[in-house]
């Protein structure tokens, strides 16, 4: 349903990813979402986070593609602060973190942030 919005999250300017790879990433995200929440449909408040999780899989594929494209020239007046693959990996990790913060934390069954009445202790005599 939201799969048509996924390419806007990936930013594959060079057209490296196929439509099948993008669809597979979306299907994998749906399976993970269903496992994490127990819901078959994506809740409206989780759409952005879910699309980012699917995009993270696509971006990992781009990082793998660019992993072998190292800069082979060394210049004395320039510094390489990271490769394109590293940049893609950072983006993918950020997207995964956002999914976990929104979807996983929404579905925790813990009492974090909620008042809890503790049972009274019996005094020893």
Image (spheres, grey):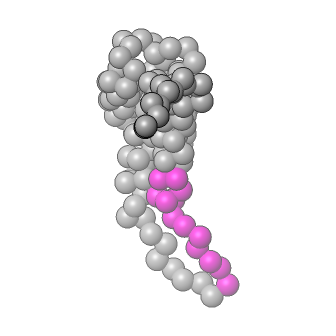
Identity of the residue drawn at 44% across and 69% down: 70
Which residue occupies the extreme right position in the image?
Answer: 77
* Residue 8, position as x, y percentages in the image: 56, 31
Identity of the residue drawn at 51% across and 64% down: 83
* Residue 12, position as x, y percentages in the image: 50, 41
Identity of the residue drawn at 37% across and 26% down: 36
Give the number of marks.
0
In the rendered image, the quadrant that contains the N terminus is top left
Q: Can see residue 83?
A: yes
Q: Quadrant of residue 45?
A: top right
The residue lying toward the viewer, choosing from 33 and 22, is: 33
Asked if residue 83 lies in the magenta stretch, the reply is yes
The residue lying toward the viewer, choosing from 61 and 15, is: 61
* Residue 109, position as x, y percentages in the image: 44, 24
Asked if residue 60 lies in the magenta stretch, the reply is no
Q: Quadrant of residue 58?
A: top left
* Residue 39, position as x, y percentages in the image: 38, 13
Left or right: where 107 falls relative to 98: left
Against 17, residue 87 (above or below) is below
Against 44, residue 6 (above or below) is below
Identity of the residue drawn at 43% across and 53% down: 63
In the rendered image, the quadrant that contains the C terminus is top left
Extent of the magenta region: 77-90
Which residue occupies the extreme front position in the image?
Answer: 125
Q: Can see residue 51?
A: no
């Amino acid at each position: 349903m939201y799969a048509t919005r996924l390419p806007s999250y990936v930013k594959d300017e060079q057209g490296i990813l196929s439509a099948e790879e993008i669809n597979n990433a979306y299907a994998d995200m749906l399976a993970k979402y269903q496992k994490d929440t127990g819901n078959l449909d994506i809740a409206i408040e989780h759409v952005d986070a879910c699309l980012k999780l699917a995009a993270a899989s696509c971006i990992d594929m781009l990082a793998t593609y660019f992993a072998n494209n190292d800069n082979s020239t060394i210049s004395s007046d320039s510094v390489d602060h990271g490769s394109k693959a590293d940049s893609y990996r950072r983006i993918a990790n950020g997207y995964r973190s956002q999914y976990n913060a929104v979807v996983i934390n929404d579905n925790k069954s813990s009492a974090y942030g909620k008042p809890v009445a503790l049972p009274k202790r019996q005094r020893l005599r």
